[in-house]
Amino acid sequence: MCRHSVNGARVDRSGVWITPNMHAICRMLKPQSLHEVWSTLPCANFLRLLDSAGIHFGEHAMKLRTVYLKVSDMEKSATFWERLLGHEPLKRSEKWTEFMIGANRLGLLLNDFGDEIKGSNAVPVFEFEENSLHEFVRRATENGASIVMDGLKIESMKSIVLSTPDGHEFELCMCHN
């Protein structure tokens, strides 16, 4: 377990961030099968912190605002994510589309500046209760996602990795404790 502190915030033995001004913010997400790997990485828990209230460094606050994907066809990609998420985007234009997911944003940026799109090595993970997960998998595949790796029946994994029509991988998983 990472035993670091930032401005008085620390990770306790159960993997919960404790700050002087707030109660436990969130549980760190670590797959059980990778526990040994995670525990050897300095600040791995800090890097996986999903604190919508932000981390405070002195007088400055930091939080994850947006993760965006470069897409080759805005209309096709925006439609895919709108159908998958089940709601309209917060913003939509020819070059930028943005969805709210909790306190965070998922953005789509039209790649009209010449970069070759190859997917991404970053994989966003969406966590669900078990009864909602299967509906999301069905909705994703009906809208053009392809299954990259199905680990839903593997007890230590309980997740599925899919790929969007643009080749971006994303993972849908059951809630972890």
Image: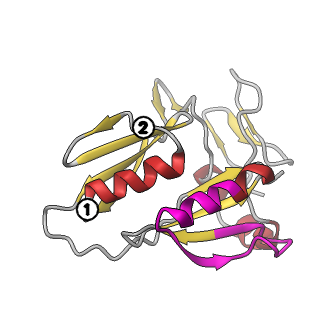
Asked if one can make out residue 29 in the rendered structure from this viewpoint, the answer is: no
* Residue drawn 71% across the image and 23% down it: 22
The relative height of residue 89 versus residue 131 in the rendered view (above or below) is above
Hey, which residue is sitting farthest front in the picture? 142
The relative height of residue 50 versus residue 161 in the rendered view (above or below) is above
Looking at the picture, which amino acid does disc 1 mark? Asp
**Residue 97 on the magenta segment:** no
Coordinates of residue 169 in the picture (x, y in percent): 49, 69
Q: In this rendered view, identify the residue nearer to me: 21 or 170.
A: 170
Q: Identify the magenta region.
A: 135-160
Q: CA distance from mark 2 to mark 1?
A: 17 Å
Coordinates of residue 127 in the picture (x, y in percent): 68, 52
Q: In this rendered view, identify the residue nearer to me: 108 or 80.
A: 80
Q: Residues within 10 Å of mark 2 (few under 14, many from 20)?
A: some
Mark 2 residue element:
loop
Q: Which mark is residue 73?
A: 1
Q: Is residue 19 left or right of residue 84?
A: right
Q: Is residue 8 left or right of residue 39?
A: left
Looking at the picture, which amino acid does disc 2 mark? Glu
Hey, which residue is sitting farthest top in the picture? 21
Residue named by callout 2:
88
Asked if one can make out residue 76 in the rendered structure from this viewpoint, the answer is: yes
Q: In this rendered view, identify the residue nearer to me: 121 or 5.
A: 121
Mark 1 residue element:
loop
